[in-house]
Image: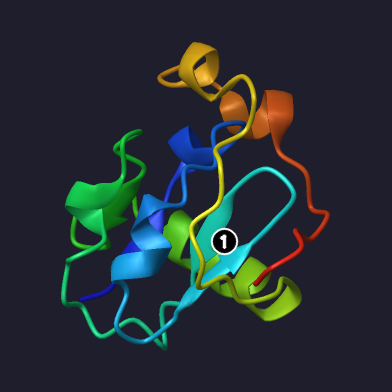
Amino acid sequence: MTYVVTDNCIACKYTDCVEVCPVDCFYEGENMLVIHPDECIDCGVCEPECPADAIRPDTEPDMDAWVTFNRKYSIAWPVIVTKKDPLPDAEARDGEKDKLARYFSEAPGAGG
């Protein structure tokens, strides 16, 4: 099992999860985070820290695509280990539908 970040992180990018991760497996895009599924040790401490409920175990239905997505972008984006402020519209965007098609950016974040 591994944990992955899903589309509810897009346009929110809360980073509460990165500070509790014991293996630094979070990577930062311009408007979301991902988890490298091969680096995640399945401890689960990040899941309850996410205010947007965007971190899910890969054992839930239909998570295969999210595992692939997280792997792809964790290779392209820089690691993030320090909590930062969420995006300005995070509260308003939390829970919106179809965020992947509407807001996702492939651009890397700053990391750090």
Compared with residue 88, is residue 69 higher up or lower down, i.e. above or below?
A: below
The three-letter code of the residue at mark 1 reads Phe
Give the percent coordinates (x, y) of residue 101: 68, 29
The residue sitting at 45% across, 79% down in the picture is: 25
Local packing at callout 1 (Cα closer than 10 Å; few below 14, some 14-19, many 20+) is some
Give the percent coordinates (x, y) of residue 93: 53, 18
User: Furthest residue to the right?
Assistant: 107
Q: Image quadrant of residue 78?
A: bottom right
The residue sitting at 49% across, 40% down in the picture is: 9
Tell me the residue that label 1 is attached to: 69
Q: Nearer the viewer, residue 25 or 6?
A: 25
Does the rendering let one see residue 61? no
The residue sitting at 19% across, 61% down in the picture is: 59
Figure disc tally: 1
Q: Nearer the viewer, residue 89 or 100?
A: 89
Quarter of the image with the C terminus in it:
bottom right
Q: Secondary structure at mark 1?
A: helix
User: Furthest residue to the top?
Assistant: 92
Compared with residue 12, is residue 21 higher up or lower down, i.e. above or below?
A: below
